[in-house]
Image (spheres, rainbow, N blue to C red):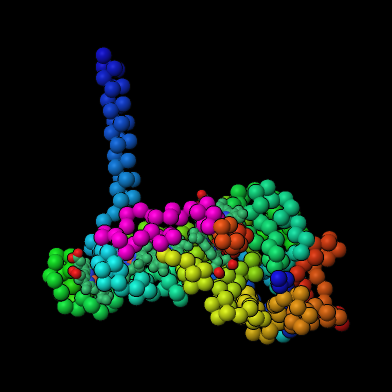
Amino acid sequence: MKKYLMLVAIAVGFLAGIVLVNYLVGRRESFVQPIDFSHAVHAGKYKIPCMACHQGVMMRASAGIPNIEVCGACHSTPMKKTPQELLVYKYVSQHKQIPWYSIYHVPDYVYFSHRRHVLLGKLDCKLCHGDMAALTSPPKTQFLQIKMQNCWNCHVKHGVTTDCSHCHR
Amino acid sequence: MPKYGMMIDLNKCTSCQACVTACKLENNVQIVSEDDAQNGRAMFWMKMLTLEFDGDYPNIRPKALPRNCMQCDEPSCIKVCPVRATYKRPDGIVAQIYPQCIGCRYCMANCPYTVKVFNWDRQAQPVQMEKTYDPDVSVRPKGVVEKCTFCIQRLQKASEKAAVEHRKLEPGDYVPACVEVCPVDAITFGDLDDPKSEVTKASRDYRAFGLLEELGTVPKVRYLNAIE
């Protein structure tokens, strides 16, 4: 009987372990943005061009998430005093950067350049990021998954090189 | 399509090793532990092969030969790679695709110049190296073979810059770090198919020779040396 109980105890412990590990791993995947930033308000309603905030898209490899000085250009005084807006104002008045969580990342062994695709390739942001101007909250998942197959398919479609060393480094 | 090559003038070279240092920093080449270094696992993409010492102490002058990947036109390394992690690009650069590499080291064994190196381990780098980290080059994981790529990341950037400026890649837009840093301009780099380029002129010099050319590897990194 005792042996039986011990086996049950081990089994329960094992299952609890799996649940705990799943919980911890799962928590690492999910994230909360510090501010519920709405692209629909800025890029949609007020038609602020993407380049105004993501200043690297035409000039550099990385698009870049705007720093607090960019927000400060308009949010130096609270406008409608909604809770989210006041939060931005707090960051602006304290000259503190907003710790955004970025979901689009290529591994360090891949060379991806926005200048190449947006300026030279004349590709729309929508192709890779979806309709950002319709999002009222920060995106939670990648629109076009950053997988080699996805890069490859589009390159084949456009007749662009698929030589490994053009993307890998 | 250009064909990139390099000529190293040994009569100009002072063995200062600036190229060795520049290469190491440009490409995030790992600094290995003391034990590994003692076991012959030190990692260099550009390395000095000491040939002789001229003169007597204290006026001694070492004579060494900077040796990087020869970027062979008939590379023996690519023929043995079972996964095509190394191959020759149309422009002649022998590329190395790190995530594809399975670490079997056949290519190393087949390289007559022994210029490929293996990541036996991944050491924490000295704190002083943090500031020299180059974000344009990936840090190779443990178990991967690497070698000189003629600073291919510089070509990626230079060709994009040229395209933005609506022009073709011009000589001098793209040079590897070792060429740029050499204080006596002993290294010339450029297009071997362009008859007017510096490197083509140098390769026609009577002093020109390649290492182990009799093997038929057709190295595109060659040397100049006057035999007295």
Region in magenta? A126-154
Q: Nearer the viewer, residue A112 or B4?
A: A112
Is residue B226 part of the magenta span, yes or no? no
Q: How many marks?
A: 0
Q: Is residue A133 magenta?
A: yes
Residue B167, x across and y down, in percent: 61, 80
Residue A152 location, quadrant: bottom right
Q: Is residue A15 visible?
A: yes
Q: Which percent across, then down, holds residue A32?
A: 26, 56
On the question of residue B56 being in view, the answer is no
Residue A11 sits above or below residue B45 on the image: above
Query: In the image, residue B198 lies at what x, y percent?
Result: 74, 83
Residue in the image at 57% along x and 76% along y: B163
Where is residue B208 shown, x and y percent of the image?
82, 77
Image quadrant occupied by the N terminus of chain A: top left
Q: Residue at x 83, y 81 (%)?
A: B205
Residue B169 vertical placement versus A113 (above, below): below
Dividing the image into 4 quarters, which one contains the C terminus of chain A? bottom right
* Identity of the residue drawn at 32% across and 54% down: A140
- Residue A8 sits in quarter: top left
